[in-house]
Amino acid sequence: MAKPTLSRERVQAEIGIIGGSGLYEMEGIDAVREVRVATPFGRPSDALLIGTLDGVRVAFLSRHGRGHRLSPSEINYRANIYALKSVGVTRIVSVSAVGSMKESIRPGDVVLPDQFIDLTKRRMGTFFERGIVAHVALADPVCRDLWAALGKAAEGAGATVHRGGVYLCIEGPQFSSRGESLLYRRWGVDVIGMTNLPEAKLAREAELCYTTMALATDYDCWHETEMAVSVEAILETLHKNVTLAKRILRAVVPLAAGARTCACAAALQYAILTPPQAIPLATKARLRLLVGKYLKRS
């Protein structure tokens, strides 16, 4: 693949992939351009890398920045989601390393969670502030259509796949204490991570389809016969899984492309409670990309 070039012209994409900075280095991707996007919420984690994969325009975003410079709490989740939306992305596949909270989910397995529990404490989790209030539905936080496509792609790539489950998101950057890990086990969660929230919530507010490919790397620290989680163990398993993850991503892109029939595209239709005439002009301008179609007559 040719070295990405910085582009100042408008470049569009359909599928967004958030994950490690090496995910875009896969066979079949052409005409990659590096696009830096300014947002009303500050800088995204990195430039977007936009290219064509099997005929579909794809935008890759390194969640922690190239070189892994940002801790989970430092990531500008709002800027990341806004930036992807601004280049035309309608669907996001998130790739995340997670700890397994169940014996049946082994390191190296792929988990496709369909629920989240948010234990983060310091992150801005909504676009709606400064004179506008919206309450989106989040009972089913992942797009079922995109989730199903990812499951089909993962199974077709030969992965051991667990469809469904609860992703518990902690603040970090520290791993859990043993007491916390045992408590979370009693809650019945399936995997634990630090990055998918408020990412999933913001994607819903931006009317984007969202799903997660969670790569199990360890058993956190609850397991009696396995060593407690360590960065070394995580990296070793991730390196083994990177080829598999790329195969899954390449397979899911054509399955996910095309017109949407899910409800994600209209998540804000009845969610905005503030009357248009009461929303400050500056706020309308700031959120025009997200709410403009609902405020056209205001």
Image: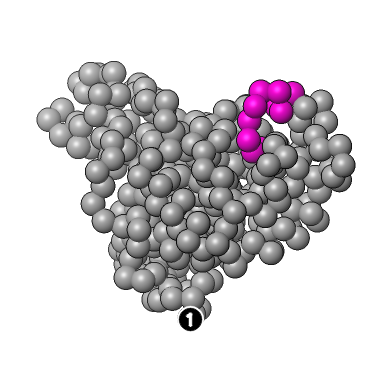
Was residue 191 drawn as part of the magenta stretch in this picture? yes
Q: Is residue 199 left or right of residue 296?
A: right
For residue 145, above or below residue 272: below
Q: Quadrant of residue 290?
A: top left
Q: Position of residue 69 (x, y in %)?
A: 66, 54
Q: Position of residue 133 (x, y in %)?
A: 35, 21
Q: Position of residue 93 (x, y in %)?
A: 46, 51
Q: What span is colored magenta in the figure? A: 183-192
Q: In this view of the protein, which residue sits in the foreground, 262 or 76?
A: 262
Q: Is residue 291 left or right of residue 194?
A: left
Q: Is residue 233 left or right of residue 285?
A: right
For residue 208, above or below residue 95: above
Q: Amino acid at mark 1?
A: Ala
- State the residue position of label 1: 2
Residue, far left:
297
Question: In the image, what residue occupies the spot 76% across and 40% down?
Answer: 220
